[in-house]
Amino acid sequence: LYVVLGGSQYEAIARQVAGSDRQRMIATAILLLVLAAFGAGAWLFSYLTRRLRLLTGEVSAFTASRFDAGSPVAAADRPRDEIDQLRNACHYMADTIQQQLSALQEDDRLRRELVTNVSHDLRTPLASMQGYIETLIIKDDALDAGTRKQYLEIARRHATHLNRLIQGLLELAILDSRSVTPEFEHFPLPELIHDVVQEFRLQATEANVTLEVDPPDESVSVYADISLIQRVLENLVGNALKYTPAGGKVSISVERSAAAVGVSVADTGPGIAEEALPHIFDRFYRADERQDRADSSMGLGLAITRRILELHSSKISVVSKARQGTRFHFDLPVAARAA
């Protein structure tokens, strides 16, 4: 009786079976490693790109809202890497777009308002001129010399008003176009103030209004555009004289500090109503619509004044009390600081 415990053939088959099992195990292990690596890679990719997806969603929502201010792109509190920096850049871009859209909408509103106001301001004096001229033509023989002269004087006054209106509109349009670059230079401010006072001296005398300058330091110099600042002073002094009754006073004062030179123009007129103060720098705004349209201001002087001071990085303020007068104030950089 022979018992075969092993043999070359058996051992070969056993080796093949064992090798096949090992191959399956290795293949399975490799497959599991590949699946694990793919899962880990997908999770890692999702983790790394989640902020980019969030940013993409915010930008898409902002775009879908037609850049509405109610759907801004949020900024990262503490930028940690380039993605946070990109998010902050998108946030600032969204803010800039919203500001520019708001500015465009405001410009469009002002443009429509300007067209409406200009049409009204042009139509009124033109209609008056046309009426008086047609009367002169139709009733020329029936009018005496005094009446004829009166009608011509009224027509002339309306023509003067139209000329001032057109000049003011052109000046404001040039200033608003941002094509004006102030020509900054050092000049003594008291000399310019005295020149403006002399310009209005006759008008003040005829109106029986005292026009005075508080004696400033004659050595005060500022760094600004002298022609534009002269226009500011002319507008403020002219308005003050216009609304100051006989026996009143208009004064110009200068105060120097370490950083700037403050200029004030004050009057003893009737003052400005509290509800009108926020609007007096709006173009075509008149605090008192009861005035004669041909003699009243066009509501452009203070708008031009504010725009000129904005070009000098300065703001104008106003303080007014009923029956006590009005005071306008603005600052200019001192020459030494600007140099």
Image: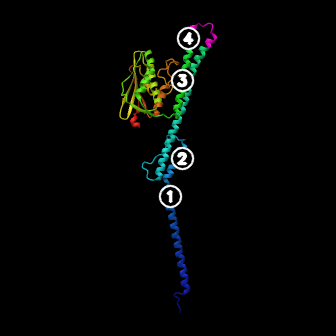
Residue assigned mark 2? 60
- Disc on res. 283: none
**Alpha carbon distance from label 3 to label 4:** 23 Å
Q: Earlier in the sequence, mark 3 or mark 1?
A: 1
Q: Earlier in the sequence, mark 2 or mark 1?
A: 1
**Alpha carbon distance from label 3 to label 2:** 48 Å
Q: Earlier in the sequence, mark 3 or mark 2?
A: 2
Residue lying furthest bottom in this view? 1
**Alpha carbon distance from label 1 to label 4:** 89 Å
Q: Amino acid at mark 3?
A: Leu
- Disc on res. 45: 1
Residue at left 58%, top 19%? Answer: 126
Q: Dividing the picture into quarters, in which one does residue 16 lie?
A: bottom right
- Disc on res. 165: 3
Q: Seen in the image, is 154 located left or right of residue 207?
A: right
> Where is residue 247 drawn, in percent x and y?
40, 15
- Foreground: disc 3 or disc 1: 3
Element class at badge 4:
helix
Residue assigned mark 4? 150
Residue 11 position (above or below residue 246): below
- Foreground: disc 1 or disc 4: 4
Residue 326 visible? The answer is no
For the record, the magenta segment spans 134-153
Crowd tier of the residue under label 4, counting other residues whose Cα lies within 10 Å: few below 14, some 14–19, many 20 or above:
few
Crowd tier of the residue under label 2, counting other residues whose Cα lies within 10 Å: few below 14, some 14–19, many 20 or above:
few
Q: Amino acid at mark 4?
A: Gln
